[in-house]
Image (cartoon, grey):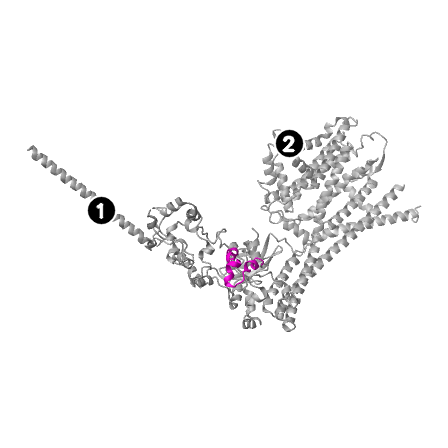
Amino acid sequence: MAKEDTSEFQANQKIHRTVKLVVTLALLLLFFVVGSKAQKDAARAGGETSSASPTANPSSGKNSCLECHQAMGDQLAAPIAAMAEDIHGKRGLSCANCHGGDPTADDPTQAMNPGKGFVARPKPAEVARFCGKCHSNAETMKRFNPAQRIDQESEYSSSVHGKRIKQGDTKPATCISCHGHHGIRAVSDPQAPVYPLNVAQTCGGCHANTDYMRAYGIPTDQLQKYSQSVHANALLKKRDLSAPTCNDCHGNHGATPPGVGSVSNVCGTCHARQAELFEKSPHQAPFAAAAMAGCVVCHNNHQILLPSDEMLGSGATAVCSTCHTEDAGAQGAQKMRGLIEELNHHIHQTEGLLTQASIAGMEVSRPIFELKEARDKLINARVIVHNFSPNAIETAINQGLEITGKAHQAGQEALNEMQFRRKGLATSLLVILLAIAAIYLKIRQLERH
Amino acid sequence: MENTNTPVTTRRKFINYCLGTSLGATLVATFYPIFKFLVPPPITESTEASVVAAKVSELKPNSGKIFKFGSKPGILVKTPSGEIRAFSATCTHLDCTVQYKEEAQHIWCACHNGRYDLMGKNVAGPPPRPLEQYTVNVRGDEIIVSKG
Amino acid sequence: MNLSAITTWVNDRAGLEPLRALAHKKTVPLHRHSVWYYFGGMTLFLFAIQVGTGILLLLYYRPSAENAFESVQFIMTEVRFGWLVRSIHSWSANLMIATMFVHMFSAYLMKAYRPPRELTWVSGTLLLFIVLGFGFSGYLLPWNKLAFFATKVGTDIAGVVPGIGTFLLRFLRGGDEVTGATLTRFYGFHVAVLPALVTAILFVHLYFVQQRGMSVPPSLAGKPLQTMKFVPNFFLRDLMGWLLALGALAALAALFPWELGEKADAFASAPAGIKPEWFFVFMFQTLKYLPAKIGAVDGEVLGILAFGGGGLFWLLVPFLDRQSAQGKSSRWFTLIGILILLYIVGMTIVGYAE
C-alpha cells in the first residue's frame, strides 16, 4: 500500500511538471506572437518598410549609429554634434531616417547593410533623390509642415545645376551645396546659408570662384557687381529683407539665368509699373527684335546702381546716347531730362526758401506739406520715363511745377510777413523811443524850476 | 495876466503835445496786436494730435481719402464691409503718398506699384514695412483720427 | 463838461482824495544807490505784462497732453500776433525773474529789511517763491520734450525730500509719473492757484512799501538827503524804464522768437542736455556735484535740505540780523549775501559752460 501511494505520488508530480512546462511554453509562444505583431504594426505605420522611414523614433529603442560613431570619435563622430542644431534633428529625425540601414543591429555589417537601404554618402547626382525621399513626398512633409512645398526636386531638375548633374558633371550645386548637411537650418534662421542676407555669399562660394567656374566659361564677377548694387545696399546695409538677392531673380531650386524675354518679367515682379510702361513703350519691339534684354540694357543686371537723372538725355553719362546720338530719340531724351531737372531744381529752390522761412521762425509746415506732393510728382515722372514719351513726362512735370509754384509763393509770403514783422517792430520801437524822449524832455522841463 | 506866448509856455505845450502823441501811439502799437490776437484766426482750431479727417457721410464703403495729419498725409480707408481705418499715407519705400484703389481693394503707391492690404500691411512691390496705423474714432458724423 | 469836472464828479463818488494825497506825499530819497529803486517797479511792470499776455494766451491754450503742444503751435502760427504774444510772455517771464533777483539782492545788501520793514521783506520773499513756482509750472505747459524731461527731473528732486517726498512727488505729478494729469495740475497752479496767492501777497507787499516808504541804506540813514517827488518826477523816470523794457521785449520777441521744440513723448528717450530754466540751474548743478553719500546720508537729500534751510534763512533774515536791526552795520550779513550771490552766479555759469 505504501508503495502504491509513493508511485501514485510520483505520477502526480510528473503530471504537475508537464502542465507547468506546457503553460510556460504557451506563454512564451503568446509573447512571441504578440511581440512580432506589434513589430509588424509599427513597421506598417511607418508607411515604408525601408528603414529610411522618418517615423522611427530615435528616443525609443536602440541607435547603434550613435553608439559606434560616438565611440570612434573625431571626424566620424562630427555629424552627431552637428545634428543637435539641425532642423531634422530637432524634429526628432535621426541618422537612419536619411542614411537608411538598421540602427538596431550591433554588428556594423548589419547596421550599415546596403541591403537594408544604407547609403553612406550619396553621389552628387543622387543627392536630390536622397533628400527628395521625404521632401518630394506630400504625405511625409504634411506631418512636419503642412505649408511646405514639395516641388524642390522637380524644380531642381529643371535648373542648370540639375541638368548638368544629370549629364554626369559633379561640380554643380546640389541640395547640400547651399543648405549644408548635418546642421541644416531653416531658411528663416539667420545663421542658415540660405537666409536672405547670406544667399549672395553662398552662391558666390562657387560662382565667384574663378578656378572652380573656369570650365563653364561664364563670368565670375556677379557677386562683386551685385555687392555694389542698389539691391545689395538695401538688403545688406539697410537690412531690408524684402530687397532681392540672387534667388529672387534667378529662382532658387530652379536656378537658371533669365532669358532675354523674361528679364522684364523678372524685374517686373517688383518694379511692376516700370515693366508695364516699358511693355507699351516704343522700345519694346526693337529691343525684342535685336534680342536686347529690356531693363538690363540701361540698368545692368547684377550691378544695378541707384538710377539718376544723369542716365537720361544725350550727354556722356546718359545711357540713351549708347543708341541715340543725333536723332529724334536723342532730342526726346534731352527734353525729358530737361523737364525732370527743371522740376527738381524748382523743388530744391522752394525747399531752400521754405527752410529759410522756417529758420527765421515762420510757420511754413503747410507749404512744406504741399511740396511733398510735388516730390511725388517728380518720382512719378522718373517712373514714367520708362514709357519714353516726352509728352507724358511733360504732363506729370507740369502738375509738379504748379504745386511747386504755389509752395514757392507761400514761402515768399512767409518771408514777406517776416519783413512786415521787422518793419512793424521798427515802427513800434521808433514810437517807443519817441515816447521815451518826450518823457525825458518833460522831466527836464519839470525839474528846471 | 497870463502870457500865452512866452517861449517857455510854447515849449511846454510842445513837449506836452509830443508826450501825449507818442504815448498814444505806443498805446496803439500795444493794443493793435492785442486786438488782432483776439479776432479768431481763419483756421479756428489746433488740429494736430487728432484731426477730423472726414465726415462719415462723405466716405462710401470701398473708398479712401487723403487727409492732412500734422505736416504729413494720412489715408482714411472705408473697407467694403464698412469698417473705417486710418494709416499714415507715406509709402514706406520712398515716401510717396499712397492712395486707395477701389477696383483692387487695396492701398496702392503709384510711384513703384507698392501695395498694402487693408490692414496697412505691405503685400506686394518694394515697400519694406507696413504703414503706420492710427486710431479712428467716430463722433457724430465726424471721423476723428488720432495717433497712438 | 471838461476834464476837471469829470475828475471832480468821480472824486465826489469814489473818494480818491487820500490816494491823491498819498501820491503827493510820496517821495523817493536821492543818493548814490537810488538807481536800485527802479527794479521793484520794473518787476511790477513785467508782472503786469505777464498777466496781460497770460490772459491772452488762455484764449487759445488747451491744457491736455493731446492738445497742449498743438495749441501752442497753433498760437504761434495761426493766431495773428500769437507769435508775438507767446514770445513776449516767455521773454517777459525771464526778464521779470531777472529784475526780481536784482530788486531782491539790492534790498538785501541795502539792508532794507531793517525794522520796521521786516514784513515787506517776508512778503517779498514769499513772492519770490511763488514766482519760481510760476516759472516751474509754466515751463511744462507747452508740453515739449525738454520741458517734459526737465519736469520729470524737477519733480524727482521733490520726491527725495525726507518724510514727505513721496507725497510731494505724487502731489506735484498728480500720480506716479509725469503725464497729462501733471499738465492739467500745473496748468491749474499756473493760472489759478499761484495768481490768487500772488495777488494777495503782492497787495500786502505794496501796502507795506507805501506805509513805510522807501528804505535808505544804513550808511546814509539819519543823514539829510534830497528827495524827489514820486509823482510826477520819479514816476516819469519809471515810465521811461518801462517803455525801454517794452521795446526790448518786442525786439527780443520779433528777433528771437521763443522756441517751441518737439512735442513731448513719454516713451522717447531723454534728450541730451536737459536743463531746467536758468534760474534753477544753480540748484540743479549743485545737486549734480554732490557725492552720492555724505556720511550716512544721501548727498542729494542733504543738498535739498540745505536749499530748504537756505530758503528759510532768506525768509527770516530780518529777524536773524540783530546788528542791522539796531542800526549798526552788519558785515557778516553783507558777506553772506555777497557769497550767496557769487555762488548763484558761479554755479549758473558752470551749469551753462558744461
Q: Which of C217 and A147 is in front in this view?
A: A147
Disc 2 target residue: C302
Can I make out residue B56 in this image? no
- Residue drawn at 23 percent across, 45 percent down: A28
Query: Which subunit holds the residue at mark 1?
Result: A
Can I make out residue C94 in this image? yes
Q: In this view, does B133 lie to the left or right of B10?
A: left
Is residue C52 located in the magenta-colored stretch of the structure?
Answer: no
- Residue drawn at 64 percent across, 50 percent down: C71
- Viewport quadrant of the C terminus of chain A: top right
Q: Which of A386 and C212 is in front in this view?
A: A386
Residue C322 % position (x, y)? 75, 26
- Real-space Cα separation, disc 2 to disc 1, in angstroms: 92 Å
Question: In front: mark 2 or mark 1?
Answer: 1
User: Is residue C175 placed above or below C296 in the rendered structure?
Assistant: below
Is residue A200 located in the magenta-colored stretch of the structure?
Answer: yes
What's drawn in magenta, residue-wise?
A199-228
Question: Residue A29's mark?
Answer: 1
Q: In this view, does C260 lie to the left or right of A145?
A: right
User: Is residue A76 placed above or below B117 in the rendered structure?
Assistant: above
Tell me the crowding category of disc 2: few under 14, some 14 to 19, or many 20 or more residues within 10 angstroms, Cα based: some
Amino acid type of the residue tagged 2 in the rendering: Leu
Question: Residue A47's mark?
Answer: none
Residue A258 % position (x, y)? 51, 65
Query: Number of marks in the image?
Result: 2
Q: Is residue C63 left or right of residue A267?
A: right
Mark 2 secondary-structure assignment: helix
Tags 2 and 1 in contact by the CB under 8 Å rule? no
Amino acid type of the residue tagged 1 in the rendering: Leu
